[in-house]
Image (tube, rainbow, N blue to C red):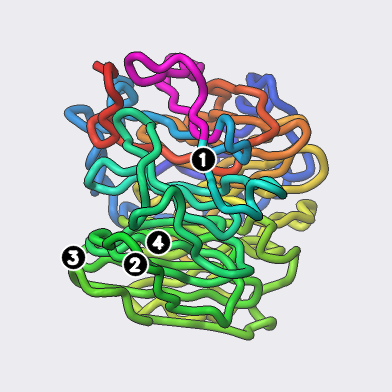
């Protein structure tokens, strides 16, 4: 663990070396916070240290730069004519790759008459363990073959209609089901037959974003709503059931836009903490307590100078990365989750416009997806938050990192 004076020094180097802009008021606020945290040093130090390093990342631990050779970045775009992009993580850059024989973009077909007439978009995706890439957008669910990125059917259809009027922003899977998260929570059995429909688990809350995770043989699905959150669980092929559902807690969740606005959500497997984006920072709850709604003492709050929303969150190996969306840039805060509330370690600024929509954390690099005018894909190293690649793109909706062998892209040797 870095000592407070080492962290302050690292922040100074970041401000001098990065080609991005840093907000001095925020750096000063974090320096003051770190200086105050020097007292009682060692509390929680080493919790989870070394656990999970390199887990699921091939033969190389996170400390070895070659671990990125085993990772692939997937970018989901709102444009159905260019909906899915795959990248290798190269030194300080991103290299787009395509399956062998493919030369064009990945287009998503939809034969719903209303979608054909009025247009449709893509919002989120996930990779399952059977070589399927599932996508959601508006009120539809789609499936691609992960190795070829060619579209397949969903329960005998080009696309599955999940809701009559809803909209979905995230999708994840459990061993037996695909779960779409948005204005409703809808699941479809992986072995669905032609003509089968989705089943609604929750239509009482509008969820901004969702995430899936598993440990100890239990699979979870979580969604963050405007004024609460929900967590569902299953220990096998059965449909997930409610584990913790918190609603109508305006005293803990501040409004910063409807479900169409990105709101960060992430789970860290080392500390088993679930993080929800809020107007002033991050709401933190933990599996050890059953993911209950907590009081504000466990929250992490932005420095007073940062009037922002936690629009995107990523977590890995006991650290979280929070995108504070405001002004014309996104500030990325690195947090140590071993402490309660979490402690800020560093901050960096990326982008020149746009708004944070997703954040992925790999073995050596965290990647922010920012949508809208001035948006794009922004990479920072996970340790020092130094620039590590950027691509301008106004259509980004989601970014996530998968293992190369799990994706199995044809010709990606």
Cα distance in 3D space between marks 2 and 1: 20 Å
Question: Quick one: label 4 or label 1, which is nearer the N terminus?
Answer: 4
- Helix, strand or loop under label 3: loop
Q: Mark 2, mark 3: which one is toward the viewer?
A: 2
Q: Please give the residue where the numbered disc 2 appears in the rendered image.
A: 196
Q: Mark 2, mark 4: which one is toward the viewer?
A: 2
- Residue at 44 percent across and 59 percent down: it is 211
Going by the image, does 316 lie left or right of 168?
left
Question: Quick one: label 4 or label 3, which is nearer the N terminus?
Answer: 4
Q: Please give the residue where the numbered disc 1 appears in the rendered image.
A: 109
- Helix, strand or loop under label 2: loop
- Quadrant of the drawing holding the N terminus: top left
Going by the image, does 145 lie left or right of 246?
left
Q: Nearer the viewer, residue 325 or 119?
A: 119
- Helix, strand or loop under label 1: loop
Percent x, y for residue 65?
33, 21
The circle drawn on residue 370 is: none
Q: Nearer the viewer, residue 366 or 371?
A: 371
Say which quarter of the image contains residue 405: top left
| Vertical arrangement, residue 50 with respect to residue 392, above or below | below
In magenta, the rendered stretch is 83-107
Q: Please give the residue where the numbered disc 3 appears in the rendered image.
A: 216
- Residue at 47 percent across and 18 percent down: it is 96
- Residue at 49 percent across and 19 percent down: it is 94
């Amino acid at each position: 663990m870095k000592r407070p004076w080492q962290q302050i020094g690292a922040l100074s180097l970041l401000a001098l070396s990065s080609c991005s802009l840093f907000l001095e008021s925020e750096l000063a606020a974090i320096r003051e916070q770190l200086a105050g945290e020097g007292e009682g040093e060692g509390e929680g130090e080493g919790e989870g240290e070394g656990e999970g390093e390199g887990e699921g990342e091939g033969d190389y631990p996170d400390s070895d730069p070659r671990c990125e050779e085993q990772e692939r970045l997937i970018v989901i775009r709102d444009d159905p004519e260019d909906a899915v992009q795959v990248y290798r993580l190269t030194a300080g850059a991103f290299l787009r790759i395509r399956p062998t024989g493919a030369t064009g973009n990945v287009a998503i077909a939809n034969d719903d008459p209303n979608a054909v007439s009025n247009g449709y978009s893509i919002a989120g995706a996930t990779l399952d363990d059977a070589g399927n890439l599932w996508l959601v957008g508006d009120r539809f669910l789609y499936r691609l073959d992960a190795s070829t990125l060619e579209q397949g059917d969903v329960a005998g259809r080009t696309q599955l209609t999940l809701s009559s009027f809803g909209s979905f922003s995230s999708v994840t899977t459990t061993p037996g089901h695909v779960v779409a998260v948005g204005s409703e929570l809808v699941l479809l059995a992986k072995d669905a037959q032609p003509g089968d429909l989705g089943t609604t688990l929750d239509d009482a809350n509008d969820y901004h974003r969702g995430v899936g995770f598993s440990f100890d043989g239990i699979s979870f699905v979580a969604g963050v709503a405007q004024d609460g959150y929900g967590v569902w669980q299953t220990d096998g092929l059965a449909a997930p059931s409610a584990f913790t559902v918190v609603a109508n807690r305006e005293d803990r969740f501040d409004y910063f836009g409807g479900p169409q606005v990105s709101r960060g959500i992430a789970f860290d497997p080392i500390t088993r903490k679930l993080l929800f984006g809020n107007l002033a920072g991050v709401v933190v709850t933990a599996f050890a307590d059953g993911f209950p709604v907590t009081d504000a003492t466990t929250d992490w709050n932005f420095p007073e100078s940062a009037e922002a929303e936690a629009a995107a969150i990523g977590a890995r190996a006991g650290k979280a990365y929070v995108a504070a969306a405001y002004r014309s840039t996104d500030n990325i805060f690195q947090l140590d989750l071993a402490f309660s509330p979490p402690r800020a370690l560093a901050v960096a600024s990326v982008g020149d416009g746009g708004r944070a929509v997703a954040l992925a954390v790999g073995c050596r690099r965290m990647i922010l997806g920012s949508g809208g005018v001035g948006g794009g894909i922004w990479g920072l190293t996970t340790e020092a938050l130094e620039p590590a690649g950027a691509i301008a793109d106004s259509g980004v909706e989601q970014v996530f990192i998968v293992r190369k062998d799990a994706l199995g892209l044809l010709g990606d040797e």
